[in-house]
Each structure stands twice: as C-alpha cells, then as structure tokens.
Image (cartoon, rainbow, N blue to C red):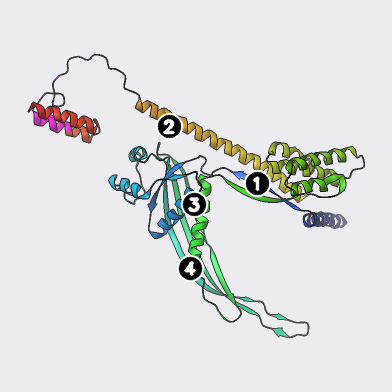
Amino acid sequence: MLRSILLAMAISATASAQFWARLINPDVQVTLNHPPSLGLKVTRIAFLPVGGANTQDLISALTTDLSASGKMEILDRANFDAILKEQSLGESGYIDPATVTRLGKLLGAAALVTVSVPVCKGSQVHLTNDQSYTDKNGGYHPNIHYISKTSVQFIASIQVTDLTTGKIYKSQRVVLDPSLSNESEQGYPEYPDELQVREAAINAATVSVHRMFLPWTEAQKLIFFDDKDYGMKGAYQSLEAQNVPAALEKAQASLAAAKADAAAKPKYLARVNYNLGMVYFIEGDYDSAKPYLQAALEINPKADIFQQSYGNCQRALQLRQESQQVDDRTEAQRRAEAQAQSQAAAPAPAAAPAAAPVKTASNGGGSAEDRLAHLKVMLKKGLITKHEYEQKRAEIIKTL
C-alpha cells in the first residue's frame, strides 16, 4: 500500500514538474513538411463531375484553390465538356479502360479527378445549456442558455485516375459534419444560415483534397528551456531574434559546459541536450537533432516534453523519406511516359520484301464499290487513319 502511494506521489510530482516547465518556459515553432498524400506529384488535371450543384460548387472551390498554388494546371472546363460530349462519356463517372488512354491523349492531362458529393444535408435543432446555480445561502439563480444549432452532413468522394495507364491512383472519402450555433439567454435565437455552414464544409473538403495533390506544412509549438544555467537563456534569446546560427553555437556551448561540470544535475543535462536538438530541429536538420533529443529522453524518459519532441523528430524523418519516395515515383513515371512517347513517334521498321499480293477488295481486287465499302470498315475498326482513308478513297474514285 505504501509503495503504491509513493508511486502515485512520484507520478504526480513528474506531471507537476512538466506542467510548470510548460508554463514558465517559452514556445518555439517547428515545421513538419508533408508530401502530397497522392504519393505522386501531378501538375495537370481535369475534373469529371458526377452529380449536381453541390459537386459543381466543390469543383469550383478546388479549381480556385489548386490554380492559386501556381503548381497545378486545371484543364478548361468548357473544352473538357466538349471532349466528354464527343466521347459520349456524359456524367456517368465511369470510364472503361479502352477509353482511358484515348482520353489521356486528347486531354494531355496527367490525371482525371472524378468528384461526387452524394450527401449534403442540413439539419437544425434547439438545445439548452443550464448554468443555474445555488449560492451559499441557498438562493437559486436560474441561468439557462438557449441554443439554435445548424449542422450540415457532408460526404464527398474523390477518385484520381492516371490517364496514361488507367490505374486508379487513389480513392478518398471526405466525411464532414460542421455546425454553427447562436446562443441567447432570452429564448431561442435565429438559426445560423445553412449556406454558411455548407460553405464551411466545402472549404474543409477543399483543404483535404489540396493535401492529396500538393505538399503542405504543419506547425508545431514545442518548449525551449531558457534557464540561466549553462547559458541556455542566451540560446533562446538568439532564437527569439531569429538568429538560428548564433542559437546553435550557444546551444552547443551550453551542452559542453554542462558536460564539463561534474556536479551538473541530470535535469540540466537533459535540458541542454534537448535545446541543442531543438535548434537543429528548427533548422530542419532532423538527422542531427535526433541523437540529442534521444539523449534528453534517455535521461528523463517520463518527461512528456521530451517524448513529444523526439516523436515529432522521428515523424519529420519519416515524412522526409516519404517526400523522397514521391519524387522518385514521379521521376520514374516521367521517364516512362517520355519513353512511351518516343516509341510512339519512332518510324516503323522497314518491312522485308513481300510476295506479290493476291488481289482483294482491300488492295485492288473486286469492284470499286466493294473496295470503298471495305475501306470504310477498316476506318471504323481503327486499322487506318482518317488521312489514309481519304487518300485511298481518292485513288479508288480516280479509277472510276
């Protein structure tokens, strides 16, 4: 029993120390760089809508957002609609494999993004929040807050198809339930505008799709120790002045001073290691940051400040690896597409001399009418081009 009490006291003391450490030490910001979740860098896309007004609104928001990045080219919608009509695709959202490569050549687009919003449903409800209380003299004080809440259930489906191979890169379902509330103590107020809540849902869905195609950054606020001991405060002051090289030099000096002090407390040894790791982290040098953050955690493995920062560093390293994989896949695909285009443009190898052909309706035998009919069949089957068809047709008509 006594052992359990002592353990509980120790845990409580550790939590209290961490609380005060967060309270009295300043924050610094580190950035985690995320690659596009699609796993590939796509620079040109076309949107294929499936559905009505809600789908069109989401596509409009996505077009504005991705175009504003300066890193994406969106195929003009009017041109795309004309191509869809010509190819008899309509708004089915389905493209059979045989059509994919043909559509890719027509569009010159890297990816086709099929967008659907099957659910966008608003709801309104009245709620109350009873904050009434009784004072020390037994007096009752009613205090009821009346709430009018508007919510929107929003579900969108996003599918990205490679128009070169017909392969589906990724399918993603975006499920959102945003809401707005009006509150009053004088009865139920008006409901918030449903259109405003719907706009919030579209904006949130746009952010989610943005992260499929483009890299994005995530800011994290972490603690930096600014104790006077071993010059830690000086390192923070340099960071505050946005002089990272000076902060790095001072953090290195702090660690050297603490290591040289035989009487240095473990608490300060952990902090100087941590601070040096944090400066490297801020610099984006995650490989250098990791061993110092790990050293701080090994000295005090129960400190959640050290656990969080070390975890974030490992995550940053993982994201960097994922970004490199995205670059490698993108480069590999670019080379494959360039090779395919080169092979398609190369002239066909010269054929060996052939035996005298047997006359048929396709090469000169039969009546002119039979030859014209056969020529038309070859065109429909795609065995000859439109230009070849016109040329051969003219030759046959000339013989007439």
Q: Earlier in the sequence, mark 4 or mark 1?
A: 1
Mark positioned earlier in the residue sequence (2 or 3): 3
Mark 4 or mark 3, which is nearer to you?
A: 3
Q: Position of residue 195 (x, y in %)?
A: 47, 66
What residue range appears in magenta? 347-375
Taking depth in this image into account, of 267 and 230 the one nearest to the observer is 230
The residue identified by callout 1 is: 31
Q: Amino acid at mark 3?
A: Asp
Please report whichever mark, 4 or 3, sits nearer to the chain's N-terminal start.
3
At label 1, the amino acid type is: Thr
Residue carrying label 3: 65
- In the rendered view, would you say 289 is above or below 147? above
- C-alpha span from label 4 to label 1: 35 Å
Q: Residue at x 71, y 80 (%)?
A: 133
Label 4 sits on residue? 194
| Residue at image mark 2 | 337
